Image (cartoon, rainbow, N blue to C red):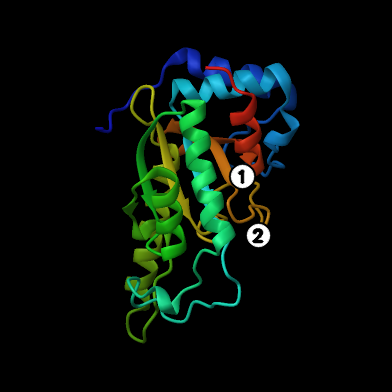
């Protein structure tokens, strides 16, 4: 699947039918309360799913549930999962549930990008079968004496890359998936507060290009299950 740049005009109108009554979409730069998909029921929920089926959206997932008895102790070696907080068994099941829901709902996915942390990579693999590692979704840069300016520049570069991932329109009839931690996204997503996005939760985002995007809804694992159980082909 190759990345192209287009947005089916009717797709925006389709989702606006579901979101207009809530005033859900806000321009970047504001600080709205992010609406929850659990508030979208019945015919509106069906319209919401129909919009995702048409593609053109970015969906950011916070990694699935983790084992909080583990701690991150070494950011210098992303390949060593023994020094990271990893998915719990419940988290693995949740990630698989998300993937099954996407298949059952017929939601197309073009590309999947993930933070290098194993809890994010495992979530991407279990839900979507693959994921391209992006350091921008991790975002942290070690600051060493004598290299403060270089670290600041790299952090700014990663931030710009995250904004581009959120604002760049996916190929026609496809959606882009991002899987990461909450902290790197808080500074770039208006209205997102710490721990508002629980493990496994997702934000559905309408990319507008040129660094602009709109946050539409917060979606939980239970929401995906509910939608998949009530959807019609």
- Image height check: is 158 above or below 13? below
Q: Residue at x 53, y 78 (%)?
A: 71
Residue found at the very far bottom of the displayed protein: 145
N-term mark: 1 or 2: 2
Toward the viewer: 186 or 60? 60
Q: Secondary structure at mark 1?
A: helix
- Quadrant for residue 128, please give it: top left
Query: Which mark is drawn over residue 221?
Result: 1
The percent position of residue 151, horizontal first and vertical second, equals 36, 72
- Quadrant for residue 183, please give it: bottom right
Residue found at the very far left of the displayed protein: 2
Q: Is residue 163 left or right of residue 89?
A: left
Toward the viewer: 78 or 191? 78
| 1 or 2: mark nearer the eye | 1
Query: Which mark is drawn over residue 49?
Result: none
- Image height check: is 208 above or below 12? below
Q: Residue at x 49, y 47 (%)?
A: 96
Classify mark 1: residues with Cα within 10 Å, few (<14), some (14-19) or many (20+).
Answer: some
Quadrant occupied by the N terminus: top left
Q: Residue at x 42, y 57 (%)?
A: 122
The percent position of residue 131, horizontal first and vertical second, equals 34, 50
Q: Is residue 34 visible?
A: yes
The percent position of residue 101, horizontal first and vertical second, equals 53, 35
Classify mark 2: residues with Cα within 10 Å, few (<14), some (14-19) or many (20+).
Answer: few
Q: Is residue 196 left or right of residue 104?
A: right
Residue position marked by numbered label 2 in the rendering: 194
């Amino acid at each position: 699947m190759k990345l192209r740049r287009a947005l089916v005009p009717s797709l925006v109108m389709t989702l606006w039918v579901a979101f207009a009554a809530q005033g859900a979409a806000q321009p970047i730069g504001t600080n709205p309360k992010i609406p929850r998909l659990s508030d979208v029921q019945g015919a509106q929920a069906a319209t919401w799913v129909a919009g995702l089926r048409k593609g053109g959206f970015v969906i950011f997932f916070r990694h699935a549930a983790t084992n909080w008895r583990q701690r991150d102790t070494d950011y210098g070696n992303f390949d060593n999962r023994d020094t990271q907080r990893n998915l719990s068994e419940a988290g693995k099941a949740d990630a698989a549930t998300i993937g099954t829901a996407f298949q059952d709902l017929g939601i197309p996915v073009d590309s999947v990008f993930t933070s290098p942390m194993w809890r994010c990579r495992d979530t991407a693999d279990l839900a979507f079968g693959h994921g391209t590692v992006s350091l921008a979704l991790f975002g942290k840069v070690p600051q060493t004496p004598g290299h403060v300016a270089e670290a600041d520049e790299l952090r700014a570069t990663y931030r710009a890359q995250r904004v581009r991932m959120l604002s760049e329109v996916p190929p026609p009839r496809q959606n882009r998936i991002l899987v990461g931690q909450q902290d790197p996204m808080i500074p770039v997503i208006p209205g997102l507060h710490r721990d508002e996005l629980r493990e496994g939760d997702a934000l559905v985002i309408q990319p507008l290009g040129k660094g602009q995007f709109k946050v539409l809804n917060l979606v939980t694992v239970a929401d995906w299950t509910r939608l998949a159980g009530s959807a019609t082909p």
